[in-house]
Image (tube, rainbow, N blue to C red):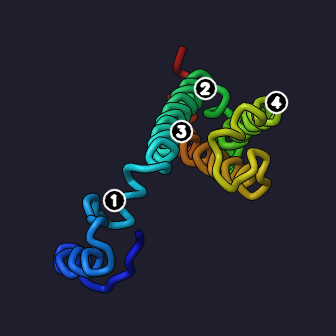
Amino acid sequence: MAVRTEVELASVLPELRGATRDFDSRIDVWQARTLREHLADGPLAQPRTSALLLSGFGLAALLLAAIGLYGVMALAVRERTQELGIRNALGATAARLRWEVLRDALSTTVVGVGLGLGIALLVSRLLVGMLFQVSPLDPVTLAAVCAALLTVSVMAGYLPARQATKIEPMGALRAD
């Protein structure tokens, strides 16, 4: 039995029990709880837990990818110190140097996004059982994920790109 009320369940429960006893003395209200409690323990508990776990793992993977991309880009800038210093000495603007480093980060990410989309298309049939009212090939979701990855890529590559603009030409020529 379901009852809609605008007050707390505990305040309505005695009246509800009395009304059901008056209707039929063999009926007893024995497991009264709110709809929210019923859904939390019922059929949606396992999918909700799975969704939370997958979201957590996805965020952790995104954070690890950002840290890894930052490390790779920082190493690339460190290895290209001499080249970037020479470009700076020859008159390259800070915006140009930043763009060159960010372009490397974006190209790496675009390759990864392309491979990821290909793999997602291949394994989409395995995910159908975990998704509720969403297609595994939902174009809006796939576009949002791609945009998020590209945004993280720009953010992870920005600090090394900024460092590239601060390379002193004379110091870079003396290095190594």
Disc assigned to residue 37: 1
Disc assigned to residue 76: 2
The nearer-to-camera label among 3 and 2 is: 3
Q: Please, is residue 77 above or below residue 22 in the view? A: above
Instruction: Compute the Cα span from label 4 to label 2.
Output: 33 Å
Residue linked to disc 4: 122
The nearer-to-camera label among 1 and 2 is: 1
Q: Please, is residue 119 above or below residue 30 in the view? A: above
Q: Amino acid at mark 1?
A: Glu
In the image: residue 122, left or right of residue 153: right
Tell me which label, 4 or 2, sits earlier in the chain. Answer: 2
The nearer-to-camera label among 1 and 3 is: 1
User: Residue 98 location in percent, x, y?
Assistant: 64, 46
- How many tags in the picture? 4
Tell me which label, 4 or 1, sits earlier in the chain. Answer: 1
Dots 4, 2 in contact, CB < 8 A: no
Give the residue displayed 65% in from the left and 46% down from the top: 131
Q: Quadrant of residue 156?
A: top right
Q: Please, is residue 151 above or below residue 128 in the view? A: below
Instruction: Compute the Cα span from label 4 to label 1.
Output: 38 Å
The nearer-to-camera label among 3 and 4 is: 4
User: Residue 157 location in percent, x, y?
Assistant: 58, 41
In the image: residue 51, left or right of residue 14: right
Dots 4, 1 in contact, CB < 8 A: no
Front residue of 9/164: it is: 9
Q: Amino acid at mark 3?
A: Gly
Front residue of 70/46: it is: 46
Dots 3, 4 in contact, CB < 8 A: no
- Please tell me how crowded label 4 is: few (under 14), some (14-19), or many (20+) other residues with Cα within 10 Å: few
Give the residue displayed 27% in from the left and 65% down from the top: 29
Q: Please, is residue 33 above or below residue 98 in the view? A: below
